[in-house]
Amino acid sequence: MKIKTKFSATLILIAVAFFMSACKGKYPGYTKSPDGIYFSLHKIGESAQKASYGDYITTDLAYSTIHDSVFFTGRRKFRLEKANYPRSVNACFTMMAEGDSASFIIPAGDFFQKTLGKTLPSFLKEGDDMIISASVLEIQSEEQYNREKEAFLKWIEDFGEYEKEILKQFLEGAQIKVAPQPSGLYYIKLSQGDGKKVMLGDTLTIDYEGRFLNGKFFDSTIKQEEPFQYVYGQEWQVLKGLEEGIGLMEEGEKALFILPSSLAFGQEGSSTGIVPPYTSLIYEVTIKNIR
């Protein structure tokens, strides 16, 4: 009985110490890790094995401003890689195990510019922090991920022919008579530009919306109110099919592109899991500026 009382008292002291350290920090309710990351653990999963760099993480995410205004929610699957700067979102996940839920406060500028490779949204400014809330659904080692991927790709070997049939039915149903480019890309001009053509090395500012053949949207700069800017001809900036299509456009032009999977995310699908393997896509693109 004395042992139980002593044990209970110890737990209370630990809890009080944790509570006091959380309240004294810059952000009430958050504890500061040795790496300088502010975190608040909401739920502890049954696994004691923390995520490690090289693992594949499946997680539900929410991004918020420091004042709790949510501006993104979604599910992501990605390979956890070590960042070369402190307080990165990747470092946050090494503090979590499968089944855990937590919130982290990190620099918004580093997250958007260094992790996502995007400009900071207009509602955030340099020096701002942001909140990332995450629930870890699954942690896979690289070996486990590759085994699952290999089995899945064998299962969908026949999907290439299936995709062609689905695309054919869509084109017939939409009464699209435009002949495809030699690559298989469909280019439909929706509005005329000013005659200024896209050239290699130009910096383009574009708006785009991506959707599946069933009309469901999966990406949109218009909904995010944040045009996309990139250097035309620079590798890995846009999908192969979009790079080809945008090269046919003029400043001010609006066009519709239909991309077979060979010009989009191919037989593997997108790394986020949003776009499945062997999936044809539709993109509506407007070139706002060529510089």
Image (cartoon, grey):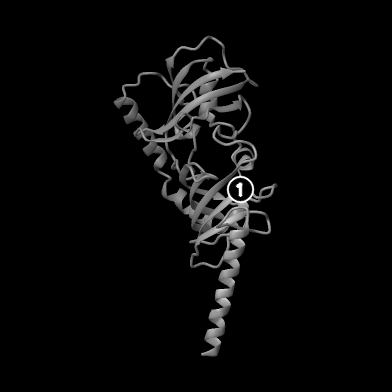
Q: Does 262 sit left or right of 27 as displayed?
A: left
Q: Is residue 38 above or below residue 108?
A: below
Label 1 packing within 10 angstroms: few (<14), some (14-19), many (20+): many
The answer to whether residue 54 is visible is: no
Closer to the camera, 261 or 233? 233
At x 54% / y 62%, what residue is drawn?
97
Q: Residue furthest top?
A: 195
Q: Is residue 109 above or below residue 14?
A: above
Where does the image place residue 194, in percent across and percent down from the top left?
52, 10
Q: Is residue 11 above or below residue 34?
A: below
At x 55% / y 48%, what residue is drawn?
131
- The part of the image, by quadrant, that contains residue 171 is top left
Where does the image place residue 188, in percent across and percent down from the top left?
42, 19
Q: Does 233 sit left or right of 59 as displayed?
A: right
Quarter that holds the C terminus: top right
Closer to the camera, 50 or 17? 17
Q: Amino acid at mark 1?
A: Ile
Q: Does 115 sit left or right of 212 as displayed?
A: right
Where does the image place residue 218, in percent across and percent down from the top left?
43, 37
The answer to whether residue 60 is visible is: yes
User: Which residue corresponds to mark 1?
Assistant: 106
Closer to the camera, 212 or 51? 51
At x 42% / y 50%, what residue is drawn?
155
How many numbered markers are drawn?
1
Closer to the camera, 230 or 238? 230
Q: Secondary structure at mark 1?
A: strand
Where does the image place residue 206, in percent across and percent down from the top left?
53, 24
